[in-house]
Amino acid sequence: MSIFSLFGGGANINEGVAEARETSGAILVDVREADEYASGHIKGAVNVPLSSIGKISSTVSDIAVPLFLYCASGARSARAMKALKQMGYTSVRNIGGIRGYTGPVE
């Protein structure tokens, strides 16, 4: 395992987004700050910044819902994934960074 795979650098965000779209009930979560989200995000993603991850229950109350996390590079989404698992969320996946995303953003 490389250092990059620890932080999501080995994740393929394009495959992750496709999997999220195919997973019933899944939520795509952008953990970048609000200004980064506003500058362009993947369609359908909700914004829950890493700095506010402790408040995710106001957006996602079901701890079993599949969450697919991304940020700019994959590092913050890796930290968010760890925090969410500690909070009891059971289906959390870091899909990497939007920098590698080739689809449309809004």
Image (spheres, rainbow, N blue to C red):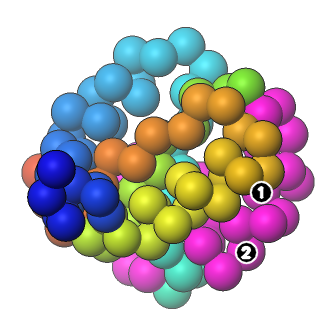
Of residues 35 and 65, the one drawn nearer to the viewer in this rendering: 65
Element at label 2: helix
Residue linked to disc 1? 56
Q: Position of residue 9 (x, y in %)?
A: 19, 60
- Residue 85 vertical position relative to residue 17 in the rendered view, above or below: below
Q: Residue at x 16, y 50 (%)?
A: 1
Is 104 left or right of 44, judged from the image as shown? left
Tell me the tag on residue 52: 2
Q: Amino acid at mark 1?
A: Ile
CA gap, disc 2 to disc 1? Answer: 7 Å
Q: Residue at x 28, y 28 (%)?
A: 18
Examine the rendering and report whether any part of residue 38 can be seen: no
Q: Position of residue 91 (x, y in %)?
A: 59, 30
- Residue 14 vertical position relative to residue 36 in the rendered view, above or below: above
Element at label 1: helix
Region of the chain picked out in magenta, as a range: 36-63
Location of residue 64 (image quadrant): top right
Q: Amino acid at mark 2?
A: Ser
Instruction: Say if the magenta span includes residue 44.
Output: yes
Q: Position of residue 78 (x, y in %)?
A: 44, 60
Q: Position of residue 13 (x, y in %)?
A: 24, 46
How crowded is the residue under tag 2: few (<14 C-alpha within 10 Å), some, or many (20+)?
few
Q: Are marks 2 and 1 in contact (CB under 8 Å)?
A: yes
Quarter the C terminus occupies: bottom left
Is 11 left or right of 43, judged from the image as shown? left
Examine the rendering and report whether any part of residue 82 can be seen: yes
How crowded is the residue under tag 1: few (<14 C-alpha within 10 Å), some, or many (20+)?
some
Question: Looking at the image, how many numbered discs can be counted on the residues?
Answer: 2
